[in-house]
Image (cartoon, rainbow, N blue to C red):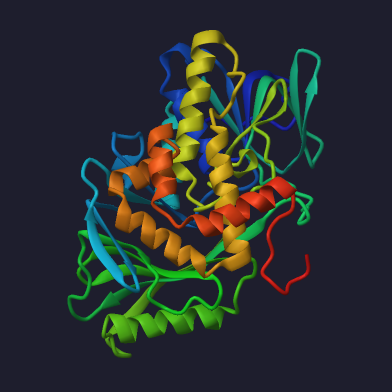
Amino acid sequence: MPKATPDAADTYDYLLVGGGAAGLSLAYHLAQEPRLAGQRVLLIEPEPKTQNDRTWSYWADAPGPFDHLARGRWDAIAFRAPGFERVLSLGSYRYYSIRGLDFYRFVHAALAARPRQFTQVQGEVSGVLEVPGGVEARLADGRRYRARYAFDSRPPAIAPRPDRHRYLLQHFVGWEIETDRDVFDPTVVEFMDFRGPQHYEARFMYVLPFGPRRALVEYTLFSAQRLPKAEYEAYILDYLRGTLGLADGHYRVVEEEIGAIPMSDHPLPARAGARIINLGTRAGRAKPSTGYAFQRIQAQSARLVAALATTGHPPADATGDRWQFRLFDTLLLDIMQRRGERTRDIFRQLFERNPVARILQFLNEQTSWADNLRIMNSVSAGPFLRSIWQVLRGQPGRRKGSQG
């Protein structure tokens, strides 16, 4: 893929601001659409992606463009909570996990094979604004690039309004370990293991097995504050010793994963203007109540490219999100903020009283009104009624005794 020169005055068709999952996904979808082969695309990245900085997991019941990159794929998941444990066959679904570095390398190779269509520059974008006839990206070093449309995946700049919206994190520490004996069932993902103490929050273990002796073991929380790193590690150690029966010296930590994903109902618009379309977390693609983003990014990318190829313009509705799912996310966030420990009961009821396909479709925002009602009728109404009241009041819920 050619590099633009610092004094380049070219005008492109599309500017892609940011080279993470969202920017590169859109670039790949553009590259695969023959009707857009003549469009010139400029990708602006702040720095090269040379490290495995993250892992994306997702489930799907149809082939996707990146499934072949998956380090692991599974046909079953396990849900565990006090009073209910079950291994659930995914039926037509598969659960996938992709390493970030594998994704970056694959997409960059695909773009490099189309040097007439894709150009790449490196630099920090200080602003994207509309100008007569198009858009302009301004870099911190003074460079400027123009195009007909811009697709912006920089992290959103949010001024929090805790009096109006809910702000939580999905935060975690994970150890990828190797053991000296067979420990893991490589066919089953431990999707949520809520059997540990909740401490008035939603806390669970998550395990991705890559083989009988290798797995990612992760301690995950939905709450407002991160913990000291040693506290996550203490819970991982307790799980390794107490649940898996692994004594010290019988495993080694190969890699470590640390992260925090914002989970909020703060409005994140899909557009910043008629010609500036937001992508990724900037457009709310990380689902507020779960943190999963990869499939939502792919759906938006496919939607944008289909419209560009058919009409020459992005669609008026850049995401296709349905309002009722935003409400469901807000209600669950409100419950997590007021009574985080109730999250375990809600997920237990979901998995105990619904077929797994319905749950996965619901979390992917693909269920019908009828199935949405079945989902809501399967969980205790009390916590949701209280949160509906908080939404009607326009005030986020707070744990009893906290300010507000």
Residue at the (49%, 55%) spot, across then down:
381
| Residue 307, placed above or below residue 371 | above
Q: Nearer the viewer, residue 358 or 104?
A: 358
- The answer to whether 23 appears left or right of 166 in the picture is left
- The answer to whether 87 appears left or right of 269 in the picture is left
| Residue 147, placed above or below residue 214 | above
Q: Nearer the viewer, residue 379 or 190?
A: 379
Q: Nearer the viewer, residue 293 or 129?
A: 293
Res. 254 image quadrant:
bottom left
User: Where residue 349 sits in the image (x, y, percent)?
Assistant: 37, 59
Residue at the (44%, 47%) spot, across then down:
376
Residue at the (64%, 41%) spot, across then down:
282
| Residue 103, placed above or below residue 166 | above
User: Where residue 184 sits in the image (x, y, percent)?
Assistant: 22, 70
In the image, farthest residue toward the top: 311
| Residue 232, placed above or below residue 31 | below
User: Where residue 317 sits in the image (x, y, percent)?
Assistant: 59, 23
User: Where residue 189 sits in the image (x, y, percent)?
Assistant: 29, 60
- The answer to whether 247 appears left or right of 287 in the picture is left
Residue at the (60%, 36%) spot, across then down:
279
User: Can residue 115 be seen in the rendering of this structure?
Assistant: no
